[in-house]
Amino acid sequence: MDKRKCDDTCPYDSTQPLQRCDFTSATSEKCPTDVCPPFMKQTNGKVLGNTYEEGHKRRLQCNHGYLPLDPNNVTSQCQNGRWTNFTTCVQMCPPFENKSNGKVVGDSFIEGATRNLTCNKNYSPRNGTNVESRCSNGKWSKITECVKVCPPFGEIKNGTVFGDSVFEGANRTLNCNQNYSPRNTTNVVSRCENGQWSIITECVQVCPPFGEIKNGTVFGDSVFEGANRTLNCNQNYSPRNNTNVVSRCENGQWSTITECVQVCHPFGEIKNGTVFGDSVFEGANRTLNCNQNYSPRNNTNVALNESKLTSVCDNGIWSSITRCVPDKWVYRAFEFNQSIYVFTNQSDTFAEAVAFCEKGDGHVITLDDETEQQWVKQTAPIENALWEFWLGITETNVTGKCTRMHDKANVSYNNWASGQPNNANGDQECVIANRKYQWAWDDRLCTDIYFIVCELSN
């Protein structure tokens, strides 16, 4: 009987003994149990030989570029109707490239083979967790490289570094001593990279608490190196130096910061002269320079000293400065209640008196209340030659009602002498202060000639 002949309905498995066929079938024959089944198709290789009998052997041959996974197990033998197990064909990896500054250990090129990296002296793996390469599907997995070992870490002044490894990727962390802090808080870790430690910051002193600023506030709370304090002045105050409003902590000391000083209002114009200077901050100066044919004068008709020619910004207020008056003026001047009163030796009509005072940036004197009236009553007698002088007011159509010439305001105060105003001859529209009546008021013709007293704002 042909041992290979068997009914197709009789199943077989290459790893199991052949089963007996069913004797009840008229067409079936018994399949002998000492015959092994055909080999199944092998992946990436083939089985050599065509025998199936008990005791015979078949050998595995791998395709090009493939090797047996177990070189010692490439033969299968037919035993008791089954083939013994043998290895499989796997892809082969290429030769392993040499590593700079190290070597790889291992000689197999088949699937699952490994290569282990060993670095030369003074070198270490860049990544200590990736020192093995494995052959998988014909390719070696990536392996780290050998890099230099970093030198011992130097001492840090006023601080300590923690860490002991000198291999690639090792860290040193800085901790500053008491009353010191890192100059750069984002750079307190040094890392070993390719044989060099990365730059680490230094420890510097902590700055003391920042003192109070008069008339202002400083913003900021850190006292460590590099911290800033920014000045903000209170209302109506400003920094004396706008370029120095930030103080910085440097090596334990705050840099100098400016102060807050009161601001003076813009300086008014000076008629018949010019003031020089542009700052409005505390201590700023304005210096007076009179135009041609005008001079700064004081109340004794001689040139003023330099202090009167300069106005100083003091606590938000400009100090008083003299005025520029015509050189031909001969007078005495007095200060009272924020005004300067110039008693001149000039006499003229009312219109000329108005023009005369305007040249000196003033106006003909007006007596606006009882206090001013009494001050004139006490001061005017000093000028012995002075008998009567113009007041800078004119009567309206209503007798006794007057208007100030320099600002056209109605006069609310008056000090008429007894029987005045009498509007003699019907055209007395101007007013004088009459010594005969203790400097009370008297209406007169505007074309009359009387002394001139000018009033200037101080």
Image (cartoon, rainbow, N blue to C red):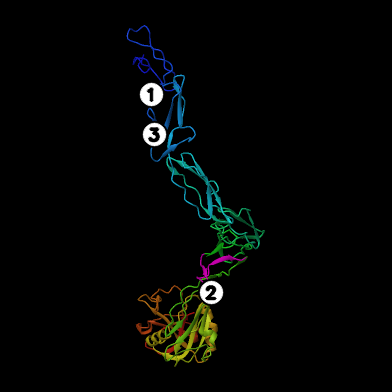
Work out whether mark 3 precedes mark 1 in sequence or the reverse, and give the earlier one.
Answer: 1
Badge 1 element: loop
Q: Nearer the viewer, residue 2 or 448?
A: 2
Q: Nearer the viewer, residue 323 or 18?
A: 18
Above or below 292: residue 392: above
Q: Give residue 359's position: percent from left, percent from top.
A: 41, 86
Q: Amino acid at mark 1?
A: Pro
The residue labelled by disc 3 is 45
The residue labelled by disc 1 is 38
Residue 366 visible from this viewpoint: yes
Q: Residue at x 50, y 73 (%)?
A: 264
Residue 323 visible from this viewpoint: no
Q: Give residue 134's position: percent from left, percent from top.
A: 48, 42
Task: Please rate how many residues cluster around mark 3, counting C-alpha atoms within 10 Å: few if below 14, some from 14 to 19, many from 20.
Answer: some
Please give the range of residues in magenta.
235-251
The residue labelled by disc 2 is 282
Q: Amino acid at mark 2?
A: Glu
Marks 3 and 1 sit apart, C-alpha to C-alpha, by: 16 Å
